[in-house]
Amino acid sequence: MATHSKKIKSKQTVRLGAINLKHDHASDFDSGTGASVSSPVTRQKAAAAKHFIENHYKNYLQGLQDRKDRRRAFQRKVQEAQIPVEEQEEMMRSLERRETEYMRLQIHKIGIDDFEQLTVIGKGAFGELRLCRAKSTGEIFAMKKLKKLEMLSRGQVEHVRSERNLLAEVYSRCIVKLHYSFQDSDSLYLIMEYLPGGDIMTLLMREDILSEDVARFYIAESILAIHSIHQYNYAYSTVGTLDYMAPEVLLKKGYGMECDWWSLGAIMYEMLIGYPPFCSDDPRMACRKIVNWKTCLKFPEEPKI
């Protein structure tokens, strides 16, 4: 009797992975014939369990493949950049650490509900930047919220993807750190290191003109940041502010990393003079000035530089 009872109990509980499917005894057997019959609820639970397990392993294997692909692409980038072997090894170790942290975070799905949203600190063409606080730790972050429909309508999907990949891959004290990224049905979210000092544009709006010493400091910091990005072969993108775009970008005939140094030079000009070198109320006129920079680039007599 004890053995028969154990068999009945084993039929009553079916273990499929981590999911328990418990059946009512009367629903498992036909009362007239004693034959085993599954109830609609049982069949539904079994189908759901099967779907869950298949998706789980499919996503797991896809994640491993994505990780291998990212590693190969990363190796190719650092080799093409001709970075010394020691630096390559350190960069690979850094990537592995971030990948491991990412896998750990995947166990607990991070979402918008994990953060308390605080004040808005900036707005862009298709999103906003606000302070947020992690509910579990109380740590303060900057949350960049990007509207999917706006990105699609403006053709900015690839630019946003490049930004996310850059922040995730590039490890430098001069580049803001990306902690988490996730999405919901309406928006993409980048949870980043919060830097309370503000940005260069706000500084220029407040100060109008910077001294040579102050400008030198910010330009030096910018050079380090741009160099960090160039090591990973990021530079080919048409996103940017017109006043700072290089001629080759506007001509759309292809360009290299030199265009970033042009843009930094234009920003330095604005720091010291008070306005960009090719500014105009008419965007078409600004484009013409940039393309014909050899005749249009002027340095005013004041201030003395």
Image (spheres, rainbow, N blue to C red):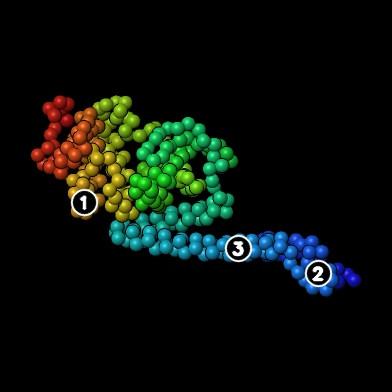
- Indicate the amino acid at tag 2: Asp
The quarter holding residue 304 reads top left
Quadrant of the snapshot with the C terminus: top left
Query: Sequence order check: which comes first, mark 2 or mark 1?
Result: 2
- Estimate the spatial distance between the alpha carbons at disc 2 and disc 1, rounded to whole Å: 75 Å
Gap in angstroms between the C-alphas marked 1 and 3: 48 Å
11 and 227: which is toward the camera:
11
In the picture, the disc for residue 63 is none
- Residue 43 against residue 272 in the figure, above or below: below
Quarter occupied by the N terminus: bottom right
CB within 8 Å, label 1 to label 3: no
Residue at the spot of label 2: 30
The residue singled out by tag 1 in the image is: 252
Q: Secondary structure at mark 2?
A: loop
Query: Crowding at label 1, few (<14), some or many (≥20) Cα neighbours within 10 Å?
Result: few
Disc assigned to residue 51: 3
Along the horizontal axis of the image, is 50 left or right of 229?
right
Horizontal and vertical percent for residue 276? 21, 34
Where residue 173 appears, as percent x and y from the top left, is: 39, 44
- Residue under the image location 63 percent in, 65 percent down: 50
Q: Amino acid at mark 1?
A: Lys
- Give the answer, above or below, for where 125 lies relative to 203: below
Front position in the image: 23 or 70: 23
Q: Position of residue 296 (x, y in %)?
A: 12, 37
Specify the quadrant of the image occupied by residue 196: top left
Give the Cα separation between the discs numbered 3 and 2: 27 Å
Horizontally, is 19 left or right of 114 in the view? right
Which element carries disc 1, helix, strand or loop? loop
Q: Which quadrant of the view contains residue 80? A: bottom left
